[in-house]
Amino acid sequence: MKIASFNINGVKARLGALTDWLSEARPDVVVLQEIKSQDEGFPREPIEDLGYRVETHGQKGFNGVAILSRLPLEDVRHGLPGDDSDAQARWIEALVDGKLRLCGLYLPNGNPAPGPKYDYKLAWMERLKTRAEALLAEEIPAIMAGDYNVIPQAEDAANPKDWLTDALFLPETRAAFRRIVNLGFTDAIRTLHREPGVYTFWDYQARSWERNNGIRIDHLLLTPQAADRMVTAGTDAEVRGREKPSDHVPVWVELDL
DNA sequence: ATGCCCCGCAAGGCGGGA
């Protein structure tokens, strides 16, 4: 099973980029972030025509997540538990083909830090840790995939000094991310790609792509039962060089389930 | 030190992104 995550930065504005990539990469299941669409406005038909069923958790204007799957989906859940007052659409999960629990997440950016947006980011990460602990306790193959808005280590940025005061790289952000990973998750991309220079985001500004000024912020975190079955993982960086690209690129992992 | 660039919204620039 090939599982992918892609922050599409507006699914309606990037529909061609998405369908082209789906046709080439042929993932079995995909989590999308930043669809920037309400459920009723999501362009379902062109994606269903490629053989994918579509589950969305959208909102007007920004945020929004979705699952696209060529395999059956059961027990679809919307929203990260732990705060009924949180109206931002940043979490969707489902059981894929009865074999894998897949969670798609769009973790808050948190800038500027300090401030209320950073407080929201850290509170969201604490709720994520609680969901992660429950997933581990099930002792099943599960993946938490998405745009974490976290640069885990200096080698995950081309110019780490540029990010020292940014919410994506502050020590408190990285520590909160480690507290989740260290519960027992495997970072699929870093585990299978020890080399530096593996990035998933290049800013639109200042010719970041052309200068390869990237960061690695999209992650696939696997429970031990999923990591046991991991075969390969990678990033599809070449899509960043196409017409009207997202600023993120897909990340993916193959499991032998 | 700031803006660079892009989206959605909506019709003028602004909030949000990272």
Image (tube, rainbow, N blue to C red):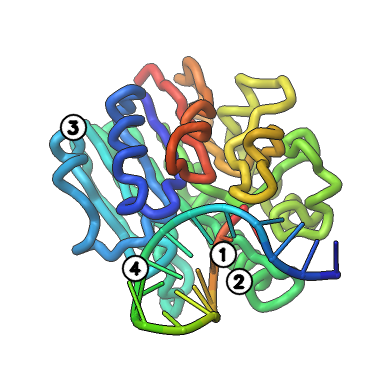
Q: Residues within 10 Å of mark 2 (few under 14, many from 20)?
A: some
Q: Residue at x 53, y 29 (%)?
A: A237
Could you say whether the residue bearing mark 2 is in a helix, strand or loop?
helix
Is residue A193 left or right of A131 when viewed as pictured? right
Q: Residue at x 47, y 44 (%)?
A: A246
Q: CA distance from mark 4 to mark 1?
A: 18 Å
Residue beneath disc 4: A59
Q: Name the subunit of mark 4.
A: A
Label 1 in the same subunit as label 3: yes
N-terminal of the two: label 2 or label 3?
A: 3
Q: CA distance from mark 1 to mark 3?
A: 34 Å
Residue beneath disc 1: A124
Residue A33 visible here:
yes
Q: Name the subunit of mark 2.
A: A
| Number of on-image labels | 4
* Quarter of the figure with residue A28: top left
Mark 1–mark 2 CB contact (< 8 Å) = yes
Q: Residues within 10 Å of mark 4 (few under 14, many from 20)?
A: many
In the rendering, which numbered label is found on residue A120? 2
Amino acid identity at mark 2: Tyr
